[in-house]
C-alpha cells in the first residue's frame, strides 16, 4: 500500500514537471488551458503533500496535544474551536480579494508564460510558506497580530513600522482598486446602473435583516442575489433607454467622485445598514463566481490566444512599462505572494483553529487555492484575441487618442485588430466602446463572458455574462473599499489617540474627521490616476504591488526570525529564500520606479520630461499637478522602501545576535497547555 | 450516498459560518439566551464592529 502511494505521488510529481515543461517550451502553437490547470494542480498537490508536510512536522513542529488559543481562550465570540474546513472556507473567503483577479490580467501583457510560472512557483514556495508560518506563529502567540509579533520577536521599531506600513499600503491599495472600478464603469450605463443598484439592494437587505427577519442572513442574501440578477437584466433596458442611459453614462471623474462620496458614507453609516449586507452579498457572489469560472474552464477547455511571450518583455509594454524582471513579480502579488495575507493569518483565523495540525491545510492550502484563482484569471485574459486584449487594456496616451489610431498602433505590434471587430464586440456586450478600458476588469470580464457563453447560450448571452462579471468585480472591489476605509479610519483614530477607551468611534466629529482624512488620502491618488495621461494603472498598480510585496518582506523577516530562534540556521532558508527574492524584486522595482531615466517607468524622469516640455514657458495648472503627482509617487515609493529597509536592518541585527550568541533569543510563545478537546469536538 | 450527504452538510455549515449564523448560535449557547430580534441586534452590533475593524485582503 505504501509502495502504491509512493508510486502515485511520483506520478503526480512527474505530471507536474511534464506539464510545466510543456507550457514552458511550447512556442508558436496555441496551447490548451487545460495544460495550465494540470500543471498547477499537480504542482500544488506535490507542494502540499511534501513541502507543507515537511514544514508542519520539522519546522513548526505542530503538536495536536497542545491546546490552541481557540480552546484556551474560548469565549464564544473571537476564540472558538471550529471545524477545519469551515475555518478553511472562512480564511479563503478573507484572503481572496480582487488582487489575484486583476494582477494576472495586467501581467498577461508579457504573454501567458511568465505570469503563470510565477503564480504556480511563487505560491508553492513563497506565498503559501508565508501564510502558513505567520498563521503558525500567531496561533502559538494567542492569535496576536503581525505587528504585535514583530514587536515581541524582532523589536519595538519593527512593530511600529509594521503598523505605519499597513496604513500607507491600505491607502494606495484603496486608490488603485477604486481606479479599476472607475475604468470599468466609465461611459457604461449598463454597468453603472447595475453597480448603483447594489447599494439600495444592500440597504434593503440590511433593514430586512435588522427588523423583518433578524438573524436570517442566508435568506436575505438569497433575496439579494436574485435582486442583483434582476439589476443586471434591468441594466440592459437602462442602456437602451433614451431617457435613462444619459443619467447613468458617467465620465471617469464623475465616477471617481461618486466612489469617494460612497467611501465616506460607508465609513460613517452604521455597519449593519450598508457594509455588512454588501459584505455577505460579495462573499457569496465571489465564491459562486470562482466556482463557476473553474467549472467553465474545465467544461470549455479554451485555447490560449496570447503567445507564451510577447514583444513587451523588453519593458515597452502599453499597459505598464518595465521589463519582466522585476515588474511581472510585483504586478502579480496576490495569487503568488501577498503580504496582506499575513494580516488575515494573524487576525481571525488563528483564533478559530481547533488543532495545531489544521494550520497546514488552512494556511498553506488556502493560499494554493487562491493561486488557482489567479491562474484562472490569467486563462480568462489569455483566451482573448491579443489585439482585443491590448485594445481594451491600453491607455489612449500610449496607443493613440482615436480608435483608428489605436488599432493601427496595436496592429503594427503584430496583434491585428480592426475598428469593426471592436465595435461588434462592444455591441455584443452592450457597451458603447471597449477601447481604453484600462485596469484589467473589463478584459477579465470579456474573457469570463467568453468562457461562460461557450459553456451555454452562445453569443446571445455574452452581454449578460459580461455585465455579470463586471458586477461581480465591482461589488467585490467596493466591499474591500468601504471596509478598508473604515479600518483606515480606526487606525487613524488610534494613531491620533481619538479613542481613549480603546474602542472606536470616539464621537461623531472624530468619526467624520478621520473618515474624511482617509477618503481624502486615497481619493487624491484616485483622482491622480484618472488625470494621468497614461491611464493611472501604469503608475499606481506597480506602487501597490511594491507596497504589498514589501509587507510580505516584513512578514517573511518576522517568520525567519522565529524559525531562527526555534532551530538556528538549519531551516532558515525556508523563509529566507522567498524573502531574499522579494527584497531583490521590490527594491529593484522601487529603485526603477523612482530613478529610471525612461519617463514611462521612472516617476522623477516623468516629472523632468513634463518640465522640459514646457521649454521655459510658465507651466499650466494641469502640468504642475502632473509634475507634483509624479514626485509624490516617487516619495511614497521611497518611504515604503525606507520603512521596510529599517525592519530588515532591525531583523538582521537580531539574527546576527543569535548567530553570535549575544542575544538570548527567547521565543515569545505561550506556554504549553495540554488539550482537553475530544476528537468529536474538532 | 452518505458521503454525499456529509459533503452537502459541510458545504451548508461553511455557508452558515460565512453568513455569521453559526457565530450567532454560538453566542446564544455561550450566554444561555434564546433567539429574539433584540438579541440578534445585540450580537450583530458587537460582531460586526469587530469584523469591520480588521483589514480585508486585496
Image (cartoon, rainbow, N blue to C red):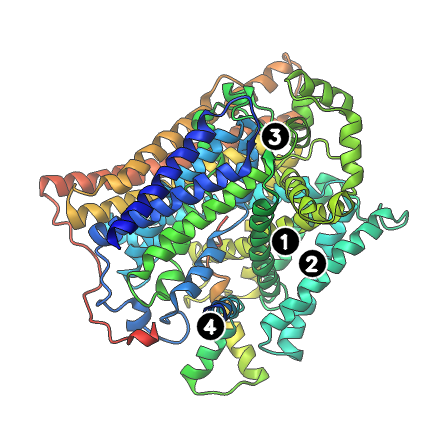
Q: Is residue A256 visible?
A: no
Mark 4 = which residue?
Answer: B2
**Residue in the picture at 84% in, 52% down:** A237
Q: Nearer the viewer, mark 2 or mark 4?
A: 4
Query: Which image quadrant for residue A186?
Result: top right
Mark 1 = which residue?
Answer: A475
**How many angstroms separate mark 3 from mark 4 (CA)?**
44 Å
Work out whether mark 2 precedes mark 3 in sequence or the reverse, and give the earlier one.
2
User: Is the residue A398 above or below the residue A510 in the image?
Assistant: above
**How many angstroms separate mark 2 from mark 4 (CA)?**
39 Å
**Farthest residue, direction top:** A615
Q: Chain of mark 2?
A: A
Mark 3 = which residue?
Answer: A305
User: Is the residue A495 above or below the residue A314 in the image?
Assistant: below
Callout 2 and callout 4 share a chain: no
Q: Nearer the viewer, mark 1 or mark 4?
A: 4
Q: Nearer the viewer, mark 3 or mark 1?
A: 3
Q: Nearer the viewer, mark 3 or mark 4?
A: 4
x, y percentage for residue A282? 59, 58
Q: Chain of mark 1?
A: A
**Farthest residue, direction left:** A661
Q: Chain of mark 3?
A: A
Question: Under tag 3, what secondary structure?
Answer: loop
Q: Nearer the viewer, mark 2 or mark 3?
A: 3
Q: Chain of mark 4?
A: B
Q: Are marks 1 and 2 in contact (CB under 8 Å)?
A: yes
Locate the N terminus of chain A and report the quarter of the image it occupies. Answer: bottom left
Callout 2 and callout 3 share a chain: yes
Locate the C terminus of chain A and report the quarter of the image it occupies. Answer: bottom left
Question: Under tag 2, what secondary structure?
Answer: helix
**How many angstroms separate mark 1 from mark 4 (CA)?**
37 Å
Mark 2 = which residue?
Answer: A198
Amino acid at each position: 500500500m505504501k509502495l502504491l502511494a509512493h508510486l502515485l505521488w511520483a506520478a503526480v510529481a512527474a505530471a507536474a514537471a511534464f506539464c510545466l515543461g510543456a507550457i514552458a517550451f511550447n512556442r508558436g502553437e496555441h496551447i490548451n488551458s487545460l495544460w495550465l490547470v494540470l500543471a498547477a494542480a499537480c504542482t500544488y498537490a506535490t507542494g502540499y503533500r511534501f513541502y507543507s508536510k515537511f514544514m508542519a512536522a520539522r519546522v513548526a513542529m505542530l503538536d495536536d496535544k497542545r491546546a490552541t488559543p481557540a480552546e484556551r481562550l474560548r469565549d464564544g465570540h473571537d476564540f472558538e474551536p471550529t471545524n477545519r474546513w469551515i475555518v478553511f472556507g472562512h480564511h479563503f473567503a478573507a484572503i481572496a480579494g480582487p488582487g489575484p483577479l486583476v494582477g494576472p490580467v495586467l501581467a498577461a501583457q508579457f504573454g501567458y508564460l511568465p505570469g503563470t510560472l510565477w503564480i504556480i512557483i511563487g505560491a508553492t514556495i513563497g506565498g503559501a510558506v508565508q501564510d502558513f508560518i505567520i498563521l503558525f506563529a500567531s496561533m502559538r502567540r494567542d492569535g496576536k497580530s503581525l505587528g504585535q509579533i514583530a514587536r515581541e520577536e524582532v523589536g519595538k521599531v519593527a512593530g511600529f513600522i509594521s503598523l505605519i506600513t499597513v496604513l500607507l499600503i491600505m491607502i494606495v491599495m484603496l486608490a488603485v482598486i477604486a481606479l479599476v472600478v472607475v475604468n470599468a464603469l466609465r461611459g457604461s450605463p449598463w454597468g453603472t446602473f447595475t453597480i448603483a443598484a447594489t447599494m439600495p439592494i444592500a440597504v434593503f437587505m440590511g433593514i430586512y435583516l435588522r427588523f423583518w427577519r433578524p438573524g436570517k442572513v442566508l435568506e436575505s442574501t438569497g433575496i439579494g442575489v436574485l435582486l442583483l440578477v434582476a439589476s443586471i437584466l434591468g441594466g440592459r433596458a437602462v442602456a437602451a433607454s433614451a431617457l435613462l442611459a444619459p443619467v447613468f453614462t458617467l465620465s471617469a471623474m464623475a465616477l471617481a467622485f461618486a466612489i469617494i462620496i460612497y467611501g465616506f458614507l460607508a465609513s460613517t453609516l452604521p455597519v449593519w445598514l450598508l457594509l455588512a449586507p454588501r459584505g455577505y452579498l460579495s462573499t457569496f457572489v465571489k465564491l459562486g463566481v470562482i466556482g463557476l469560472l473553474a467549472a467553465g474552464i474545465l467544461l470549455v477547455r479554451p485555447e490560449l490566444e496570447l503567445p507564451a511571450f510577447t514583444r513587451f518583455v523588453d519593458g515597452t509594454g502599453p499597459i505598464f512599462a518595465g521589463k519582466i524582471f522585476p515588474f511581472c513579480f510585483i504586478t502579480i502579488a496576490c495569487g503568488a505572494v501577498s503580504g496582506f495575507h499575513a494580516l488575515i493569518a494573524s487576525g481571525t483565523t488563528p483564533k478559530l483553529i481547533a488543532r495545531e495540525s489544521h494550520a497546514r491545510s488552512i494556511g498553506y492550502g488556502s493560499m494554493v487555492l487562491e493561486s488557482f484563482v489567479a491562474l484562472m484569471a490569467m486563462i480568462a485574459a489569455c483566451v482573448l484575441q491579443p489585439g482585443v486584449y491590448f485594445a481594451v487594456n491600453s491607455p489612449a496616451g500610449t496607443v493613440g487618442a482615436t480608435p483608428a489610431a489605436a488599432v493601427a498602433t496595436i496592429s503594427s505590434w503584430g496583434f491585428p485588430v480592426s475598428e469593426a471587430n471592436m465595435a461588434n464586440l462592444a455591441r455584443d456586450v452592450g457597451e458603447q466602446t471597449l477601447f481604453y478600458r484600462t485596469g484589467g476588469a473589463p478584459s477579465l470580464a470579456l474573457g469570463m463572458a467568453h468562457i461562460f457563453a461557450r459553456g451555454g447560450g452562445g453569443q446571445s448571452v455574452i452581454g449578460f455574462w459580461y455585465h455579470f462579471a463586471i458586477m461581480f468585480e465591482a461589488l467585490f472591489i467596493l466591499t474591500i473599499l468601504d471596509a478598508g476605509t473604515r479600518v483606515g479610519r480606526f487606525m487613524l483614530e488610534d494613531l491620533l489617540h481619538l479613542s481613549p477607551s480603546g474602542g472606536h468611534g470616539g464621537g461623531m466629529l472624530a468619526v467624520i474627521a478621520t473618515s474624511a482624512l482617509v477618503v481624502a488620502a486615497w481619493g487624491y491618488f484616485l483622482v491622480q490616476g484618472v488625470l494621468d495621461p497614461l491611464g493611472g494603472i501604469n503608475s499606481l498598480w506597480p506602487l501597490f504591488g511594491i507596497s504589498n510585496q514589501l509587507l510580505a518582506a516584513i512578514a517573511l523577516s518576522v517568520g525567519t526570525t522565529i524559525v531562527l530562534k526555534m532551530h538556528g540556521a538549519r531551516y532558515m532558508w525556508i523563509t529566507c529564500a522567498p524573502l531574499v527574492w522579494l527584497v531583490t524584486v521590490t527594491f529593484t522595482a522601487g529603485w526603477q520606479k523612482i530613478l529610471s531615466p525612461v519617463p514611462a517607468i521612472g516617476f522623477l524622469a516623468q516629472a523632468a520630461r513634463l518640465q522640459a516640455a514646457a521649454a521655459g514657458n510658465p507651466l499650466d495648472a494641469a502640468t504642475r499637478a502632473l509634475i507634483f503627482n509624479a514626485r509624490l509617487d516617487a516619495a511614497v515609493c521611497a518611504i515604503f522602501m525606507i520603512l521596510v529597509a529599517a525592519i530588515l536592518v532591525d531583523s538582521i541585527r537580531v539574527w546576527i545576535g543569535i548567530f553570535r550568541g549575544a542575544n538570548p533569543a527567547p521565543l515569545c510563545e505561550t506556554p504549553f497547555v495540554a488539550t482537553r478537546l475530544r476528537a468529536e469536538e474538532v | 450516498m452518505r458521503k454525499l450527504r456529509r459533503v452537502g452538510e459541510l458545504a451548508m455549515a461553511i455557508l452558515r459560518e460565512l453568513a455569521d449564523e453559526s457565530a450567532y448560535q454560538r453566542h446564544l449557547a455561550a450566554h444561555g439566551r434564546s433567539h429574539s430580534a433584540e438579541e440578534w441586534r445585540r450580537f450583530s452590533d458587537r460582531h460586526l464592529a469587530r469584523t469591520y475593524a480588521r483589514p480585508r485582503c486585496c
